[in-house]
Amino acid sequence: MLDAAIKALSQLLSPEFRTVLLKSAGLAIALLAALFIVLYRLLGWLRDVGISWTESTIGPISHEPLVILAWLLAIALGLGLFTGAVFLMPAVTSLVASFFCDEIADLVERLYYPADPAGTALPLARATTEGAKAALLALAVYLCAVPFLFLAGFGAIIFFIATAYVLGRTYFELAAMRFHPVIEAKALRRHNSVLVFIAGLFIAVFVSIPIVNLATPLFGMAFMVHMHKSLMGSRPRDELLRPMH
């Protein structure tokens, strides 16, 4: 597993991966920016409505205090949305990965497993559906974990475990679906659920690093391609070229 993680990390620096990185990072940033703008305007509108109602109820004397309150709320809103964007990154990268999973997997398979049959690219509709389901699952799990964030340390642990579960599940299934029907890929993941979860811990660590986490789709997909190949008994090219003793 550690060898698979090292291979995935080393390939992130390759010229071929840089092109995919620019595309996936750009899409992730665009999605986060769009979500930030929509939520900021929605919550800002609710704030203004509440302040207007309060001013009309109490009277003009409340105008100055409410203006100060509005500024404080605007700052808090911006900080809150920034923090929310950090927590949403795993869900966003799950969705982004669905658009580039086959491109990433092809690069890994060609470099490390040239003797193996090439995987079959997932139809875009299927890949997007799986990515959207993973993103929604991540949001649901995180909403359940939010109340525990107020418990010192405990909430962060729950969030980390939830991230490992969702990302491990998502990337392994995307890698497995290139070689198995959807039902079989999901059954394979369930049969190896402990191993997939432990592998998901590696991805959870990666996605927790600011800026670097924009490359999560590349690392997660490459890592799980190696994990799937390992389960299927494939040997990477560098092992095949090692002299026998």
Image (cartoon, rainbow, N blue to C red):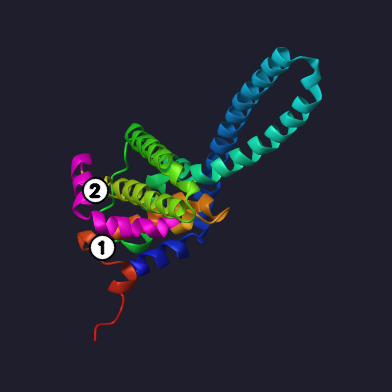
Up the image or down, 211 lies above or below 184; here it is: below
Q: Residue 107: in sight, yes or no?
A: no
Q: Amino acid at mark 1?
A: Ser
Q: Position of residue 175 (x, y in %)?
A: 31, 50
Structural crowding at the residue carrying mark 1, measured as other residues with C-alpha within 10 Å and reported as few (<14), some (14–19) or many (≥20): some
Local secondary structure at mark 1: helix
- Residue at the far bottom in the pictured view: 245
- Tag on residue 230? 1
Task: Compute the Cα span from label 1 to label 2.
Answer: 13 Å
- Tag on residue 29? none
- Residue 195 belongs to magenta span: yes
Structural crowding at the residue carrying mark 2, measured as other residues with C-alpha within 10 Å and reported as few (<14), some (14–19) or many (≥20): some
Q: How many marks?
A: 2
Q: Position of residue 186 (x, y in %)?
A: 23, 44
In this view, the residue in front, 194 or 26, is: 194
- Residue 77 belongs to magenta span: no
In this view, the residue in front, 140 or 61, is: 61
| Lower sequence index among marks 1 and 2 | 2
Q: Position of residue 144 (x, y in %)?
A: 39, 40
Q: Amino acid at mark 2?
A: Phe
In this rendering, would 80 be left or right of 57?
left
Q: Magenta span covers which residues? A: 181-204
